[in-house]
Amino acid sequence: MNIKSAPHQFLLSGLLLALTSFSVWAGTAESILIKDAGFATPESMEYYADEDVYLVANINGSPFAKDDNGFISKVTPDGQVSELKWLDGESEKTALNAPKGMAILNHRLYIADIDRIRVFSLPDGQQLKDIPVAGSTFMNGLSVAGENSLYATDSGMAPGFKPSGTDALYRIATDGQVQKLRSGSLGHPNGVIADGENIIMVTLGSGQIYFLDGQGDSQALMTLPYNRLDGLLKLDDGRIITSSWAAKSIYAIHENYTIDTITDGLESPADLGYDSKRNRLLIPLFLKDEILIHPLN
């Protein structure tokens, strides 16, 4: 279905769709599972193509704590941890509390961190000026919106994972300007991506996928039969990829809204990355302190 022609509230509840499953278990030879490597609450992964490495954001404790102990790891495509703490909040030169979503734009690494976006230069990792997001409590999803801006979500949660009432979708310019595109009761927004001129966003609480225009206005709304949606990608073949903690699975949603299971049996699959060179999903397993590199068909 063409998203642009979809009705304002196109609700698929319980999904009349066939949930076709051709699962590949995490333990198969095609996947690389990295464990006992020192990861600490890995929340997101990002492919840094210029160096051909995977970046892993480690919260290292509570996702709410301003404890300055978060870190970013580097992992090679063959599954070796080349630098466990490439960026380390405990070092004097780096401030990083609970890093979550990441995005790379114009030789800068942007990281969502509680109430701000941290900015680092690439490839040297020098910390630049933060972009504070006033009134936010749980900055989470982050993705490139265009040449000079990013989309970011505030999941609207307070310690104990209680609602804070700050649910929001933002457009954040690289010069530091912050524009709130949407707020209110959004089901705790999490993963967000640009889809041409439009936006796709998934929710942690309500298990919904929002299809929005560039101003954050609804074009369609899809409700999945499982919630706790986290990671979000859109591939060149049109598939939307999302992870669900509740279902312990990664799903592909096709343009006609049918769904396939990509892989299941995963504990807490969080914010996804994508290796475009090798056609791989990069999956942090939040509660397991592990990451999974999974090939796509």
Image: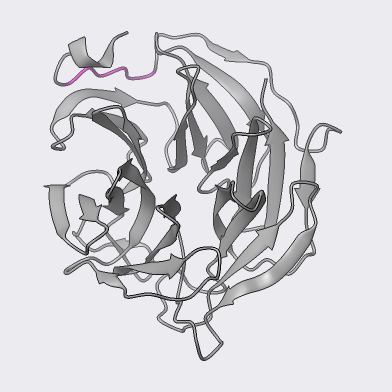
The secondary structure that dominates the magenta segment is loop
Q: Is residue 209 left or right of residue 175?
A: right
User: Where is residue 137 drawn, in percent x and y?
Assistant: 27, 67
The image quadrant where one finds the C terminus is top right
Rendered position, 17 above or below 260: above
Residue at 50% x, 87% y: name it: 93
Residue 256 falls in image quadrant: top left
Q: Is residue 164 magenta?
A: no
Residue at 46% x, 34% y: name it: 233
Residue 102 falls in image quadrant: bottom left
Q: Is residue 80 visible?
A: yes
Rendered position, 187 above or below 83: above
What range of the chain is rendered magenta? 9-14
- Between 179 and 168, the one nearer to me in the picture: 179
- Between 9 and 175, the one nearer to me in the picture: 175
Residue at 42% x, 37% y: name it: 227
User: Where is residue 36 drawn, in percent x and y?
Assistant: 80, 64
- Between 226 and 255, the one nearer to me in the picture: 255
Q: How many marks?
A: 0
Residue at 39% x, 67% y: name it: 119
User: Where is residue 35 drawn, in percent x and y?
Assistant: 78, 58
Q: Is residue 6 visible?
A: no
